[in-house]
Amino acid sequence: MALQLLPAQPDPVVVDIVIPVYNEETDLEPSVRQLHAYLRDDFPFRARITIADNASTDGTPAIADRLAVELDDVEALHLPEKGRGRALRAAWLASDAPIVAYMDVDLSTDLDALLPLVAPLLTGHSQIAIGSRLAPGARVVRGPKREFISRSYNLILRSILRTRFRDAQCGFKAIRADAARRLLPSVRDDAWFFDTELLVLAERAGMRIHEVPVDWVDDPGSSVDIASTAAADLRGVVRLLRDRLAGSSRTTRQVASFAAIGVVSTVAYIALYSLLRTTTSPVLANLVALALTAVANTAANRRLTFDVRGRDGFMTDQVAGLVAFAIALAITTGAVGLLQVLAPTAGLPIEVAVVVAASAVATGVRFILLRSWIDRPYTAEARPQAGPEGATR
């Protein structure tokens, strides 16, 4: 009796690489073909490319469908609504691969970083891996405007949300599928802030995030609206901060203590400013009054709000307080200067009212900064409770 050999079974897909696209009919085909060739010739594991089209209105959907027919391990997913985060959520939750990833359609990141990206996930070392343009060893080519915005945004994240990762928005990330199913139901953003929120929730859940320095070249033809994206990202940061404050009784006590000290400091500030204003200019009066009350305010918050006692670290904390003071000074001085330009004949009562309003804004900024720099010890956040969520391809 002749033996019948069964056809060899293909290796299972190990990595599902999602490319979220919206109106990318020019770049989609050459980028997918370049990535497909790289995965076929140079990547040691079987990988799938999923083109996640989110409501494109040009020829993108037709190109995606054609590529899915012509190329092995390429699939097309079509969503009726826009949103990069929405596209990634749907594609990742529908995938059967143990590792899901994504990269931008312009392939700005050198593909040689893909294996170092997924390796720590395959070994179990980390749950998430991200390409980083700000990590040591990265090589980046981009204009000064984008460089400034990127570094400023990530500095805000590290200062206000206490993140430890360096680069939230590089379009080159991978995550274990089990970690994705746990986190994604808790991620509320469906657009560009999706990346940041996912990483913040992962850190709060105690997951390990591995950073890979990448070679990255900016795409000068990118259609991303930097101003609106930055504004949406900052709104997302405020939302995460508000959620964090609302969920912590310790934070509630800190806010109450900081507010009480702030009231006392504001009264002292107004008294000093009004007194000095009779003999000095508005800018000098603001500088002296704010400096004196800032030193006293930092000492009081150090002891009463953040429960830091003794002399250990006192000077460091005062330096932190002075940095926060400098930022507050810029806010209040800017308000005074603007008033002088817009209403040079305004009387002292209006001037004091403007300064008090600006001081209130500066106080909020100072609380965020002082809590980030002085508060010890840091208490871990509650882990998000997330369960699996279905999606269809």
Image: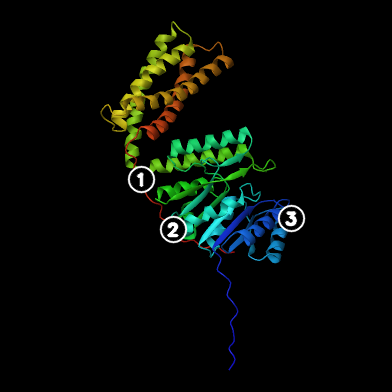
> Does dot 3 land on a helix, a strand or a loop?
loop
Q: Compute the Cα span from label 3 to label 1.
A: 47 Å
Say which of marks 3 and 1 sits in front: 1
Q: Which residue matches tag 1?
A: 380
**Residue in the picture at 44% in, 58% down:** 124
Say which of marks 2 and 1 sits in front: 2
- Label 3 with label 1: CB-CB less than 8 Å: no
Disc 2 marks a residue whose amino acid type is: Gly
For the rendered model, the colour scheme is rainbow
Which is more N-terminal, label 1 or label 2? 2
Res 86 visible: no
Disc 1 marks a residue whose amino acid type is: Ala
Q: Is residue 87 above or below residue 289?
A: below
Q: Is residue 141 above or below residue 263?
A: below
Quadrant location of the C terminus in the rendered image: bottom right
Residue 1 at x, y percent in the picture: 58, 94
Q: Which residue matches tag 2?
A: 124
Disc 3 marks a residue whose amino acid type is: Gly
Q: Compute the Cα span from label 2 to label 1.
A: 23 Å
Say which of marks 3 and 2 sits in front: 2
